[in-house]
């Protein structure tokens, strides 16, 4: 099942069946409330004009304003954006965030553009999107965007509206009203979930072996956090290579190496490893932190971890999920494990609306409390229904959205 929209609908349908969800509500959740496709004309550096296709999906706003993510990728599809907006609805509900799911995207290759071309593209996205502000729909960052892109978005929004309104855009630099801890948030949350899962399985943290597939922002932060707590990070990989050390890699040194060289490849504190085999590393905890659909029916039988913590979105296919479960491998689903970023985005909006910015320690403390509550709620729902934690998380989230819809008289 390679279509991410099909995978999203599969999870939705399974949860709906398990909770006997009303057909009318299932129908409403099976399609975005509003999906917009538009084009952005950009003047290129050589004087020519190029037209780019862009999307914004607002899945549902029964639980609050839609928000998050703007993905820029040359192979982006409308189905991908629709699926991600549904995932955001579930993720927000799982984490107790009063928001619906939103996701935007531009079909473009940032690496093939100059900084000026890219800036004009991002500003054009906001102009053509006609954003409505913090109480309606809040764009944020995703693959292909970051704090600089969000700074341009905020500036464009404020130029259009003539108002200073930092809460209108998420994932901004702190200097423009962003939250402290935004960079670390998702990785921190992944680490917290890994520690909690290990405790539940009766595993002591000291010396527990961890493999991380994808040593980018999320994977590196999670690895560093676990390293500091005594876990042995025995293998990591990124797009450039893989490295392993059965005694544990020195993560601060590896982070410094990747900052200098651009990849984990060639790190002197370990041996070169097979990138394709990183998911099959013998370890206690496996953290897929790269892209979707990397654990499949083909390799799920060779996963050698006791716990899988999904730092990436949708790294496990439905068929593989079933196989892992049948083998007794505990999977902490993406909508729980990587919700730290969404949680801190909610903190960012709150801080922007109140003009009261929190310390890094306060952000981390609040994040810990929120993500552990989400983890335990999903686990309790899974036990209550006799299902996987993934299904438990979806059932709990859909239940919250259903209640909001019924109270509003929508169904």
Image: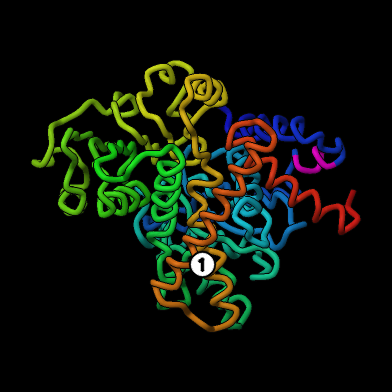
Q: Is the image coloured rainbow, by chain, by secondary structure, or in one colour?
A: rainbow
Q: Is residue 82 visible?
A: no
Specify whether residue 28 is painted magenta. Answer: yes
Instruction: Please state if 237 lies on the left or on the right of 177 as rendered.
Output: left
Task: Residue lying at the far left in this picture: please name it.
Answer: 268
Position in image of residue 169 (x %, y %) = 55, 68
Instruction: Please state if 361 lies on the left or on the right of 101 as rendered.
Output: left
Position of the N terminus by quadrant = top right
200, 34: nearer the viewer: 200
Position in image of residue 150 (x %, y %) = 47, 65
Position in image of residue 195 (x %, y %) = 40, 47
Position in image of residue 138 (x %, y %) = 61, 64
Q: Residue at x 58, y 82 (%)?
A: 354
Q: Residue at x 69, y 70 (%)?
A: 135
- Mark 1 surroundings within 10 Å by alpha-carbon count, few (fewer than 14), some (14 through 19), many (20 or more): many
Main secondary structure found in the magenta portion? helix
175, 121: nearer the viewer: 175
57, 404: nearer the viewer: 404
In the rendered view, tell whether residue 170 sits above or below residue 84: below
Specify whether residue 176 is painted magenta. Answer: no
Which residue bears the numbered disc 1?
153
Part of the protein shown in magenta: 25-29
Q: Residue at x 37, y 35 (%)?
A: 286
> In which quarter of the view is residue 240 placed?
top left
> In which quarter of the view is residue 44 placed?
bottom left
In the rendered view, tell whether residue 283 sits above or below residue 1: below
Instruction: Please state if 21 lies on the left or on the right of 69 as rendered.
Output: right
In the rendered view, tell whether residue 48 sits above or below residue 29: below
Q: Is residue 401 visible?
A: yes
Q: Residue at x 59, y 71 (%)?
A: 168
Task: Residue lying at the far front in this picture: please name it.
Answer: 202
Q: Secondary structure at mark 1?
A: helix
């Amino acid at each position: 099942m390679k279509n991410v929209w099909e995978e999203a609908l599969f999870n939705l349908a399974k949860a709906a069946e398990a909770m006997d969800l009303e057909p009318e509500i299932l129908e409403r959740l099976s399609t975005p409330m509003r999906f917009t496709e538009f084009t952005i004309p950009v003047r290129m550096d050589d004087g020519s004009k190029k037209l780019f296709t862009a999307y914004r999906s607002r899945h549902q706003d029964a639980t609050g304003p839609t928000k998050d993510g703007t993905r820029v990728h040359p192979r982006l599809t409308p189905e991908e954006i629709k699926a991600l907006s549904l995932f955001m609805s579930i993720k927000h509900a799982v984490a107790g965030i009063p928001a619906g799911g939103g996701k935007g995207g531009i079909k473009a290759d940032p690496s093939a553009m100059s900084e000026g071309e890219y800036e004009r593209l991002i500003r054009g996205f906001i102009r053509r999107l006609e954003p409505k502000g913090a109480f309606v729909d809040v764009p944020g960052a995703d693959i292909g965007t970051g704090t600089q892109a969000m700074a341009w978005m905020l500036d464009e929004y404020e130029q259009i509206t003539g108002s200073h309104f930092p809460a209108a855009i998420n994932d901004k630099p702190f200097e423009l009203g962003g939250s402290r801890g935004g960079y670390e948030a998702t990785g921190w949350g992944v680490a917290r979930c890994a520690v909690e899962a290990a405790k539940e399985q009766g595993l002591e943290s000291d010396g527990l072996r961890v493999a991380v597939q994808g040593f980018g922002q999320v994977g590196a932060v999670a690895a560093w956090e676990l390293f500091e707590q005594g876990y042995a990070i025995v293998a990591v990989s990124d797009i450039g290579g893989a490295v392993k050390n059965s005694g544990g890699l020195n993560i601060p040194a590896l982070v410094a190496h990747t900052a200098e060289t651009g990849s984990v490849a060639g790190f002197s504190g370990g041996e070169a490893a097979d990138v394709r085999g990183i998911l099959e590393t013998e370890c206690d905890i496996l953290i897929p932190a790269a892209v979707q659909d990397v654990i499949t029916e083909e390799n799920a039988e060779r996963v050698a971890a006791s716990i899988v913590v999904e730092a990436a979105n949708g790294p496990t296919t439905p068929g593989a999920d079933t196989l892992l479960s049948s083998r007794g491998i505990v999977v902490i689903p993406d909508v729980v494990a990587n919700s730290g970023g969404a949680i801190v985005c909610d903190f960012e909006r709150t801080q922007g609306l109140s003009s009261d910015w929190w310390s890094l320690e306060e952000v981390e403390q609040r994040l810990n409390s929120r993500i552990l509550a989400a983890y335990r709620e999903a686990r309790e729902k899974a036990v209550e229904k006799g299902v996987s934690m993934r299904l438990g998380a979806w059932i709990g989230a859909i239940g919250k959205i259903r209640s909001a819809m019924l109270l509003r008289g929508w169904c």
